[in-house]
Image (cartoon, rainbow, N blue to C red):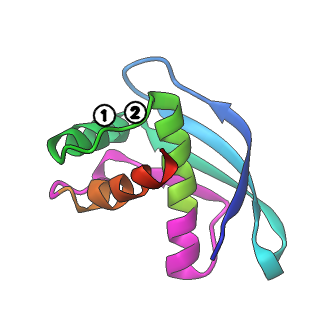
Amino acid sequence: MQLRAVLMAAELQHGRSGYHRFVFRVDGGRAGMFNVTVQISEDAYRKLVGQLARARIFPLEKVAMLKHWARWEIAQRLQDDGSVPSTITVAVHDVDDSGIYATALGRTLSLTR
């Protein structure tokens, strides 16, 4: 399924903690258009980048990486559940210690380069 998500707003945290917020307008096909807010913690971002580096997968520039990650989260929810909640929050505990989550996301990075 092709996901069409347009970034409507972004709020980036410039510090050591907090959540980066992205608001997307998503075309849900038969479900119509809807808004989704994706929040990604700075701690989760740092953990993911560390795991990608250990796997020798080099992430995009920070803002591009966060946007890609947010779109990927929306696509994962749509694929797994068939629907998307209005808010998706990614915290540090969502990025598993074994690196499986990071590797799954990392594989999609090669498609965007």
* Residue 49 place in picture, x, y as percent: 29, 38
The range drawn in magenta is 75-98
Q: Secondary structure at mark 2?
A: helix
Whole-angstrom CA distance, mark 2 to mark 1, is 6 Å
Asked whether 37 falls inside the magenta stretch, the response is no
Residue at the spot of label 1: 46
Label 1 amino acid?
Answer: Arg
- Residue 32 in the figure: left or right of residue 107: right
Task: Say which quarter of the image contains residue 100.
Answer: bottom left
Decide: is 46 above or below 55: above
Q: Amino acid at mark 2?
A: Glu
Mark 1 Cα-neighbour bin, 10 Å: few <14, some 14–19, many ≥20: few
* Image coords of residue 67 (percent x, y): 56, 42
Residue drawn at x 21%, y 44% is 51
Identified at 30% across, 43% down, the residue is: 48
Count of labels shown? 2
| Residue 36 screen position, x and y as percent | 68, 56
Q: Mark 2 sits on what residue?
A: 42
The local crowd at label 2, few if under 14, some if 14 to 19, many if 20 or more residues have their Cα within 10 Å, is many
